[in-house]
Image: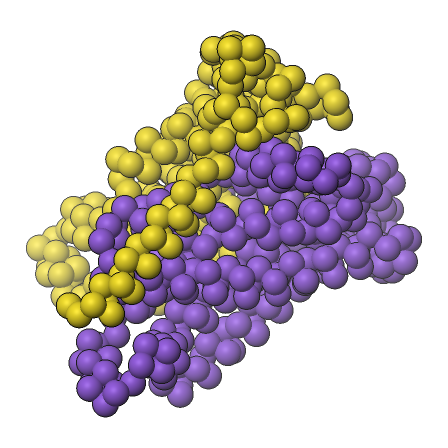
Chain colours: A purple, B yellow
């Protein structure tokens, strides 16, 4: 099919490409341009060079703080979510009764939107903190651990489903042979299951890290950055900079560019890692 | 099965039951609180309603009234259904064309679309909403164009991965029989794409139904979707009606649970397939 007439090619591609240009491409390029300007609306733009980028890091501590908060959050949730999800997958592939029921239940929180999730957990966490005379707005550490618990609750089931699929594709002969050779459960997990599900681990690692970096709705609903802006992650900090403070639109846009670069860097790094692993297999 | 295994299984089962209870508890606690008076929620979220605190469906009525929840449900449903339909319809066509026609333009389109998947929404939130404003796309119909454009990356990516696995012979045979590309696509290719169409539809439904920031910035002033309605209740500190909030949370979850139980298998399958490819 190398010779589709141009007329048809246009018919097949143009609706998507035009929508893509409107929703992404033009706003993206325009966004890069705006990050070098000072503006309030699109009619009063003045070129300011790199000063927005300098101000993003030097006007206040918010951006660095949010970056640090996000990195710590990504690391902790990467480890916790994957451990919990992997343990659940092991439990559910061990031949217990009711596997389908449990899988259905554990997966369910994924479908609930971030805003709704945020308010559900706000009620619960504040209800528990009440016993200690504090609430989520009292210190950023409550917001941090609250978000960790929330994201674990939401995402463990999702990652679990991916791990289950991977574990089920391990040939049974392999584990049977290991059992005959006298390997115990822990040895089988360490020497067979984990190496065999490595691709799934890569995918889940990638998903948890990018989800953490892009997290916004849950952050907004649970604490909205309180106290002050101490529990704000990168996406929320950009939003607050942009819409919460007049005269900071350009700085917000510059932060968004830096944010995009960070996320792109993680994705590229991840793709490199996946590729080298796939060669080894 | 020997005794050791049986004991192990019993322990696993008990652990799973506890975890299932932990997973369901938050939703049940919100449900329980939605029947309590608004001032009895924050102070004691873990107690059952008593004759003193029970208010029946009063919270639901005030929640519906304060947020315009019925309308919000309608907007959410309309936007989700038509955006998902548009995404599936147009991106599958695009994916097929750019996979089959090998040209510089095709690979340019493909890489641009894949690139857009990486970029976080905050990068374009201001410029996109301005764009929508200028082009008069700031209404429930216009926003479909934005979802098509912003969702195109992932959807084209998943569709092209699948198109590559379809043997060319089927299409060549249809061409010999005199099909034009449109007939070829709709009569031969699109039916074959069905399993991946389900995946793409489910992933986009989950995203668009729950999406908050895009509709908030683009149409939020005039049209509230469900996430916007819930966030709207937040208001200033102290003035929040916790009763209405609980009721709205429950009403926001019910459609999702119904959707989940009607197509649970394809949802889990679709999400796994999407994740492994994405």
**Image location of residue A104, percent across then percent down:** 32, 46
Would you say residue B66 is visible in this rendering?
yes
Q: Nearer the viewer, residue A223 or A132?
A: A132
Determine whether, in the image, residue B92 is placed left or right of residue B73.
left
**Image location of residue B206, percent across then percent down:** 42, 41
Q: Residue at x 40, y 43 (%)?
A: B21
Q: Nearer the viewer, residue B184 or B232?
A: B232
Task: Name the residue at the left extreme.
Answer: B177
Determine whether, in the image, residue A150 is placed left or right of residue B263.
right
Q: Residue at x 49, y 37 (%)?
A: B26
Which quadrant of the figure contains the C terminus of chain A?
bottom left
Task: Name the residue at the front extreme.
Answer: B3
Would you say residue A122 is visible in this rendering?
no
Which quadrant of the figure contains the N terminus of chain A?
bottom left
**Image location of residue B254, percent across then percent down:** 40, 28
Q: Residue at x 51, y 15 (%)?
A: B50
Q: Nearer the viewer, residue A153 or B13?
A: B13
């Amino acid at each position: 099919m190398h010779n589709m007439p141009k007329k048809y090619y246009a018919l097949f591609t143009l609706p998507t490409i035009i929508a893509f240009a409107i929703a992404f491409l033009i706003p993206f390029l325009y966004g890069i341009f705006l990050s070098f300007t000072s503006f309030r609306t699109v009619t009063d733009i003045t070129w300011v060079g790199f000063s927005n980028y300098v101000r993003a890091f030097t006007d206040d501590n918010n951006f660095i703080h949010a970056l640090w908060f996000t990195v710590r959050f990504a690391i902790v949730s990467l480890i916790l979510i994957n451990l919990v999800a992997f343990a659940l997958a092991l439990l559910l592939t061990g031949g217990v009764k009711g596997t389908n029921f449990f899988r259905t239940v554990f997966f369910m929180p994924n479908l609930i939107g971030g805003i709704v999730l945020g308010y559900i957990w706000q009620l619960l966490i504040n209800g528990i903190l009440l016993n200690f005379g504090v609430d989520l707005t009292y210190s950023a550490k409550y917001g941090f651990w609250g978000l960790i618990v929330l994201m674990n609750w939401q995402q463990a089931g999702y990652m679990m489903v991916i791990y289950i699929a991977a574990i089920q594709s391990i040939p049974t002969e392999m584990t049977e042979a290991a059992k005959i050779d006298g390997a115990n459960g822990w040895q089988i997990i360490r020497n067979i299951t984990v190496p065999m599900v490595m691709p799934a681990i890569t995918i889940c690692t990638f998903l948890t890290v990018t989800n953490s970096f892009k997290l916004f709705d849950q952050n907004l609903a649970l604490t909205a950055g309180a106290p002050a802006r101490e529990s704000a992650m990168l996406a929320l900090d950009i939003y607050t900079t942009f819409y919460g403070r007049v005269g900071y639109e350009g700085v917000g846009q510059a932060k968004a560019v830096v944010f995009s670069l960070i996320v792109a860097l993680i994705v590229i790094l991840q793709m490199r890692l996946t590729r080298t692993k796939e060669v080894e297999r | 099965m020997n005794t050791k295994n049986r004991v192990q299984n019993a322990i696993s089962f008990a652990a799973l039951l506890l975890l299932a209870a932990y997973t369901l508890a938050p939703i049940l606690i919100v449900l329980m609180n939605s029947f309590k008076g608004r001032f009895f929620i924050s102070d004691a979220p873990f107690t059952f309603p008593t004759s003193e605190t029970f208010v029946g469906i009063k919270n639901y009525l005030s929640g519906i009234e304060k947020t315009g929840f019925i309308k919000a449900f309608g907007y959410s449903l309309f936007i989700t259904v038509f955006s998902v339909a548009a995404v599936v319809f147009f991106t599958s066509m695009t994916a097929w064309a750019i996979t089959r026609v090998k040209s510089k333009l095709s690979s340019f389109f493909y890489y641009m679309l894949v690139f857009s998947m990486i970029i976080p929404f905050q990068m374009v939130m201001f410029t996109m909403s301005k764009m929508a404003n200028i082009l008069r796309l700031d209404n429930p119909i216009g926003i479909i164009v934005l979802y098509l454009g912003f969702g195109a990356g992932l959807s084209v990516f998943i569709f092209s991965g699948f198109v590559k696995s379809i043997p060319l012979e089927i299409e060549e045979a249809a061409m010999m029989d005199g099909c034009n590309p449109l007939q070829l696509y709709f009569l031969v290719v699109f039916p074959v794409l069905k399993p991946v169409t389900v995946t793409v539809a489910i992933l986009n439904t989950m995203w668009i139904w729950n999406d908050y920031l895009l509709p908030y910035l683009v149409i939020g002033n005039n049209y509230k979707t469900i996430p916007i309605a819930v966030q709207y209740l937040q208001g200033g500190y102290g003035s929040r009606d916790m009763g209405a909030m609980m009721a709205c949370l429950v009403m926001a979850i019910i459609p999702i649970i119904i959707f989940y139980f009607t197509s649970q298998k394809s949802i889990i399958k679709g999400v796994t397939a999407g994740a492994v490819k994405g």
